[in-house]
Image (cartoon, rainbow, N blue to C red):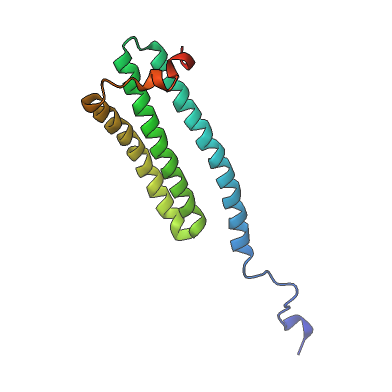
Amino acid sequence: MNKNNRISRSDGVPATAHIAKHADRLKSVAAISKSGGIVLAGVGLTAACIQIANATDTQEKNEIFVETIASTTVGTIAGFTIGLFLVSSPIGWGTAIVLAIGSTALSYGAGKGARYVYTKTGTQIDLASGAGVNRICQ
């Protein structure tokens, strides 16, 4: 038998090479998305601060504050959940994409729902002044 016809175990590609390659890609995507999520949250909070500064009515300031806190909190929790699906498996990656789309709607809806509930039930509570938002957002 010719030596060239044999399969060389030392020169072959390890069976896990593709998995390791994709795991490294996922780590870099996770690092980028983590930074991107923080930047987007900061942009959202800054936009809310500008809206609060431009609002003339205390009621409107409080509604903006409640909406922003609720949507940011729900978005953060959803982002953490999506991160768990991303590290789980390739099947989790597809689930994470669906969850990411749904989390945007969920976050938006949570903010609008919190604003509605505050308007209907908590109009006597001045949360924006109590939290010091009026001093920060001028």
Q: Nearer the viewer, residue 71 or 22?
A: 71
How far from the left and from the top, in percent, is residue 92? 44, 57
Q: Is residue 114 left or right of residue 49?
A: left
Residue at (75, 75) in percent of width and height: 10
Q: Nearer the viewer, residue 111 or 18?
A: 111
Q: How many marks?
A: 0
Q: Nearer the viewer, residue 35 or 9?
A: 35
Name of the residue lying farthest toward the right = 3
- Looking at the rendered image, the quarter that the N terminus falls into is bottom right
Q: In which quarter of the image is residue 31?
A: top right
Whether 135 is drawn above or below 87: the answer is above
Residue at (54, 41) in percent of width and height: 34
How far from the left and from the top, in percent, is residue 81? 44, 49
How far from the left and from the top, in percent, is residue 128? 38, 20
Whether 81 is drawn above or below 89: the answer is above
How far from the left and from the top, in percent, is residue 104? 37, 38
Name of the residue lying farthest toward the left = 120
Residue at (38, 48) in percent of width and height: 99
Q: In this view, does 14 lie to the left or right of 135?
A: right
Residue at (33, 38) in percent of width and height: 105
Q: Is residue 93 left or right of residue 27?
A: left
Q: Which of 18 and 88 is in front in this view?
A: 88
Q: In which quarter of the image is residue 102?
A: top left
Name of the residue lying farthest toward the bottom = 1
Whether 27 is drawn above or below 36: the answer is below
